[in-house]
């Protein structure tokens, strides 16, 4: 799979997963904007060394890359990141919105500051970076966008209410962008990765390997996630509006599905209470493509007319 002639923006590409995506995209011919603010895992500080190092690595291997040090968490920063691609190479074919931090706290103790900074970097950061690229792609024949969710957002995880809210917010935004971008040839999907990085080290899981190890040797390697990301960022990607997990080499699709449920004829809470089992039974699931499809399902089930 080649990316010759393509321009790809990767945010948070100075470390961890983003670094791997940037290196592998460049290796396959992409010209890469390596964005990274270079802060700590909880979003404090900044350091140009992170993005600069990855750009040097790419160039040393004969690839093309340019660094950008802006924060995704401001509108001006997001615009500048995409503008770096346009100024340097005149186009943007794919964006991988990957930058992220953690501020874990149990919900009962979660402060508004801890909520805000996570929403700023992840949810608003995705909006700030992806919107200018989306608009350029709309006028220029389309493109591929990958946004970053998390198993914590999709399935829930202790101490991550702020992060989970941001990550599922990104999924909701992605689904609408997929609908609105379809006619312009924009494909956008969400990835929920699992890999050992400095970020997982702060969450009590194993951290980044201290010595370089191959993905064959290291089950938690970021290189067991990147194959999916490159396939999603490539123009041949068949999917849009979908959610995928990638971790340790296991790639799967996550769906939001509805159960068969029940149709009430007695509109009382007692009628609901008497049918919990049937309502919650997950043995027969349907995956609505979008809210309009779901509305058609309601009409079919109940005979309602809107
Ligand atoms: P990492 O800490 O190794 O890399 C994240 C990079 O984003 C860092 O280089 C950091 O400087 C950069 N960054 C942070 N805030 C930024 C900002 N405002 N502007 C620009 N750059 C910024 O972490 P990792 O694990 O590689 O995370 C990448 C993405 O994957 C994040 O969105 C994270 O939430 C997500 N993720 C990772 C999981 C894992 O198992 N590693 C699990 C689920 C989600």
Image (cartoon, rainbow, N blue to C red):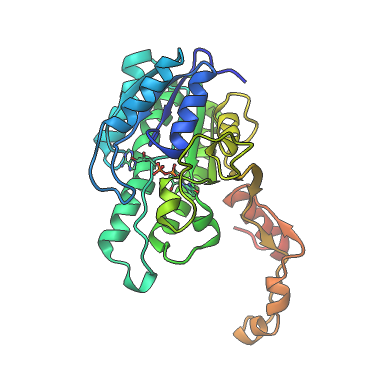
Q: Is residue 270 left or right of residue 148?
A: right
Q: Is residue 94 visible?
A: no
The residue nearer to you, when weighing 94 against 16, is 16
Q: Residue 156, how many percent across, how many down?
A: 51, 62
Q: Residue at x 65, y 81 (%)?
A: 272
**What residue appears at the point 58 percent right and 33 percent down from the top-left corner?**
214
Ligand 1 is in which quadrant of the figure? top left
Asked if 68 appears above or below 101 in the picture, the reply is above
Image check: 268 left or right of 168?
Answer: right
Identify which residue is drawn at 44% across, 32% down: 19
Which quarter of the figure has residue 48? top left
Quadrant of the snapshot with the C terminus: bottom right
Nearer to the camera, 161 or 22: 22
- Give the quadrant of residue 87: top left
Name the image quarter holding the N terminus. top right
* Number of numbered discs visible in the structure rendering: 0
Q: Residue furthest bottom?
A: 270
Q: Nearer the viewer, residue 210 or 244?
A: 210
Residue 192 in the image: state x and y as whole percent: 54, 47
């Amino acid at each position: 799979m080649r990316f010759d002639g393509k321009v790809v923006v990767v945010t948070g590409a100075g470390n961890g997963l983003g670094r791997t995506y940037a290196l592998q995209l460049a290796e396959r011919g992409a010209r890469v904007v390596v964005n990274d603010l270079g802060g700590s895992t909880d979003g404090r500080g900044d350091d140009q060394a992170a993005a600069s190092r990855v750009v040097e690595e790419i160039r040393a291997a004969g690839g093309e890359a340019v660094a950008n040090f802006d924060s995704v968490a401001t509108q001006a920063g997001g615009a500048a990141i995409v503008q770096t691609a346009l100024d340097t190479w005149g186009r943007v074919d794919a964006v991988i919105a990957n930058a992220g931090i953690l501020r874990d706290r149990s919900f009962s103790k979660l402060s508004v500051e801890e909520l805000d900074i996570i929403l700023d970097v992840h949810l608003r950061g995705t909006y700030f970076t992806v919107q200018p690229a989306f608009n350029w792609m709309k006028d220029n024949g389309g493109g591929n966008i990958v946004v970053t969710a998390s198993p914590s957002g999709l399935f829930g995880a202790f101490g991550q209410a702020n992060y989970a809210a941001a990550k599922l917010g990104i999924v909701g935004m992605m689904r609408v962008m997929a609908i609105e971008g379809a006619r312009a040839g924009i494909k956008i999907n969400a990835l929920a990765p699992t890999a050992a990085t400095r970020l997982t080290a702060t969450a009590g899981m194993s951290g980044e390997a201290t010595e370089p190890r191959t993905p064959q040797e290291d089950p938690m390697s970021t290189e067991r996630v990147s194959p999916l990301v490159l396939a999603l960022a490539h123009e041949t990607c068949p999917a849009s509006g979908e959610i995928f997990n990638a971790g340790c080499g296991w790639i799967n699709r996550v769906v939001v599905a509805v159960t068969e449920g029940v149709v009430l004829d007695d509109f009382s809470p007692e009628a609901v209470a008497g049918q919990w089992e049937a309502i919650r039974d997950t043995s027969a699931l349907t995956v609505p493509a979008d809210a309009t499809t779901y509305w058609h399902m309601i009409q079919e089930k109940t005979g309602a007319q809107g």
